[in-house]
Image (cartoon, rainbow, N blue to C red):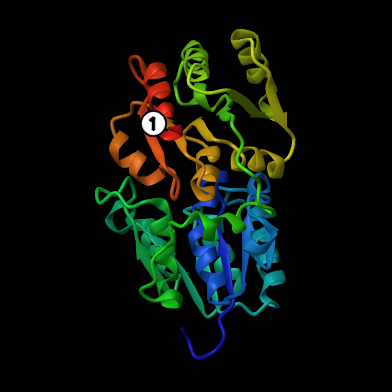
Amino acid sequence: MPDSSPSVLVIRLDAIGDALALTPLLAAFAERAIPVDLVLRAMNAHVFASRAARETFVAPFALRSSTRENRAAIASFGRALRGRAYSHVLVATEDPGGYRLARAVGAPERIGFTNGWGKPFKTLWARTILTRSVVRSAGLDPNAPHECEVLFSLARPLLGDAEPTRDPARLRPFVIEREVPRGERVVFQVSDKWERLGIAFGEVVQAIAACADVAPLALIASTNESLYAERVARASGLTVTCFDELEPWKEAIAGARALVAPDSGALHVAGMLGTPTVAVFPPIASFVLQTARWRPWAAPCEVVRAEGAWPLHAATALAAVVR
């Protein structure tokens, strides 16, 4: 710990699952009474419980944009944040806008990632902004750290040799506002993420039927994926509950007996809440490293590779996590 009281800004400009990988870090800050603010995107600004951060800001600029207008928006936002007198800014993103914002905020300590020889020009540029850097592989790290561990490493100057907790009881308060009792139903995530991962619609319907033979199911989806949800409802003969807001969606996962989901934000909600999970990943070449990086963090989990008779394997895995 530094001599003066630290105050931290964490910038994470990524999707819901990426943001949730910050949860062990936020828990460690809270346990040490280190105040923290977050900069997130509109899509994930409500993924954490209110106690997770002193304040959460929505980034008012575009990602992966170097236009004059976007740089001006970043600079203006940074000037507005300067008055909060942060001692540390953690750039927990690879997006250049996050680095530019750290520079605009002007905190004495600016810590972020560089990629070494994997991206030499970006590394040189980032070092002109950062006061400290953590080297991470430009691709998947062959040492297979979890994303939670990688993000936690940004805060070593503040947290010393502390390790990220895997205790759901310590993590849950940072994800949901209230405790939710466990129910008897297994939640199956209905999302077009299945198709975006290359997993056929018919196979998803087969997995629903196979899992329904193991335990009663509750199918959930986001309202913005209602077209896919309607297709699943017609094909499976089951009702799909669609959610407009993140909090009741998170509570559905918190109260589930278990979750079956593709590689998505739902996995990481379950992973922080301790909900037993069947995680279905596409059969890519980097399967082992990808699942090591993104499997649920603190929950019992069975990983299923989506190939061959995977719907039956998913049902077998579900039986294992609910027994």
Report which quarter residue 48 is drawn in: bottom right
Classify 10 Å Cα crowding around label 1: few (below 14), some (14-19), many (20 and above).
some
Residue drawn at the location 41% of the way across and 61% of the way down: 113
Which residue has dot 1 on it? 320
Q: Quadrant of the C terminus?
A: top left
Closer to the camera in the image, 42 or 186: 186
Asked if residue 240 lies left or right of residue 165, the reply is right
> Relative to 265, does residue 115 appear above or below in the rendering?
below
Asked if residue 152 lies left or right of residue 231, the reply is left
Asked if residue 278 lies left or right of residue 54, the reply is left
Residue 34, how many percent across, how many down?
57, 76
Query: What residue occupies the far left of the structure in this picture?
Result: 142
Residue drawn at the location 47% of the way across and 17% of the way down: 207
Query: What residue occupies the far right of the structure in this picture?
Result: 244
Q: Secondary structure at mark 1?
A: helix
Kind of residue at disc 1: Ala
> Relative to 91, does residue 68 appear above or below in the rendering?
above
